[in-house]
Amino acid sequence: MPEPLSAPMVVAFPFTRSLGPVQSAFLTGLRERTVLGVRTHDDRVLVPPVEYDPRTAEEIRDLVEVDPTGTVTTWAWNPAPRRGQPLTHPFAWALVRLDGADTALLHALDAPGPDAVRTGLRVRVRWAERREGAITDIACFEPYDHPTAVRPARPHDGVFPDPVTGIIAPARLDYTYSPGRAQTRHLRALAAHRVLGERCPSCHKVCVPPRGACPTCGVATTEPAEVGPRGTVTTFCVVNIKAKNTGHAEGTAVDVPYVYAHIALDGADLALHGRIAGIPYDQVRMGLRVEPVWTDGGRYPDHYRPTGEPDADYDTYKGLL
């Protein structure tokens, strides 16, 4: 049997958000080695602070300071840290209720092993050497067995110089994708410069790319059907945000503006999408006849270009819009 296909996939983007007065004070406080919470109208202290009471939905802005020491309420051992996690060696994820707070804060606990962690363990904040106004200003928690008088939360005005007003949090998901039978056959055909779909045994429509089942009837599809390679632009959009062209191994950037389109390949009953090139972006139109272009060594079309044929009549593709 042929080797199963698989490929590493990454979804990543920077998440940017502005901060209200409560979150701004909390993150700025961490930069200044101060842990702030918020007091609710029924005298509960929430750490980390929120702007609305989770029980009553009332707005709350009564900031208080709590101690950087606390107690582990529950925990789980992490034997193999992933990239971007707080510590590079094994550690515990722990919910820590800081002294003066009524809720727990989730963070890393640096301990020599799982036998050294327990519910009720006393811990303290280990501050990061370089702090910039983020939750990572708490590098982690560490065991702390010195006797400490637990103090109640103290009022705090939340005023600091140069407050943090916004954050950029990178979001990233790494995973390995393995296509099923239908998509594996489709991808292997593309590598040979052929476009292979599957025909539904019930409605006889040809699905490209194939999904292993008809999206209309829901029945399994197994009969291969070769389509295209030429097709018709049904709808499109003009892209003005620069991105990387993953069709190239080096991930070269595609100049903007460019056009991304739904393309109905000849013989297919489901439109696929692809980039349109070889024509000014403002000349792309519905009904434009196009053909795929493969780069040297490319396993799938890099883009589609005009064939020079007359535009397709609207009635021939209106059902695929």
Image: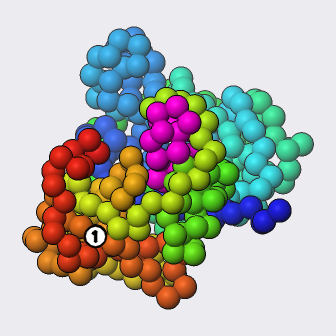
Q: Residue at horizontal 23%, vertical 50%?
A: 316
> Which residues fall within the magenta stretch?
199-215
Q: Is residue 85 above or below residue 103?
A: below
Q: Residue at horizontal 24%, vertical 60%?
A: 233
Residue carrying label 1:
290
User: Residue 214 magenta-drawn?
Assistant: yes
Q: Residue furthest bottom?
A: 296
Between 31 and 309, the one lying in front of the other is 309
Between 227 and 285, the one lying in front of the other is 227
Asked whether, in this view, residue 122 is left or right of residue 252, the answer is right
Query: Which element carries disc 1, helix, strand or loop?
Result: strand
Tell me the amino acid under the disc marked 1. Val
Q: Position of residue 303 (x, y in %)?
A: 35, 74
Label 1 CA crowd tier, 10 Å (few <14, some 14–19, many 20+): many
Asked whether, in this view, residue 46 is left or right of residue 128, the answer is left
Q: How is the image coloured?
A: rainbow
Asked whether, in this view, residue 169 is left or right of residue 79, the answer is left
Q: Is residue 242 visible?
A: no
User: Residue 121 magenta-drawn?
Assistant: no
Quarter-wise, where is residue 50 in the image?
A: top left
Q: Quadrant of the N terminus?
A: bottom right
Q: Is residue 194 visible?
A: yes
| Chief secondary structure of the magenta portion | loop
Q: Position of residue 74 (x, y in %)?
A: 71, 30
Q: Residue at horizontal 41%, vertical 13%?
A: 55
Q: Quadrant of the C terminus?
A: top left
Q: Position of residue 24 (x, y in %)?
A: 31, 46
Q: Residue at horizontal 71%, vertical 57%?
A: 81
Q: Position of residue 38 (x, y in %)?
A: 38, 29
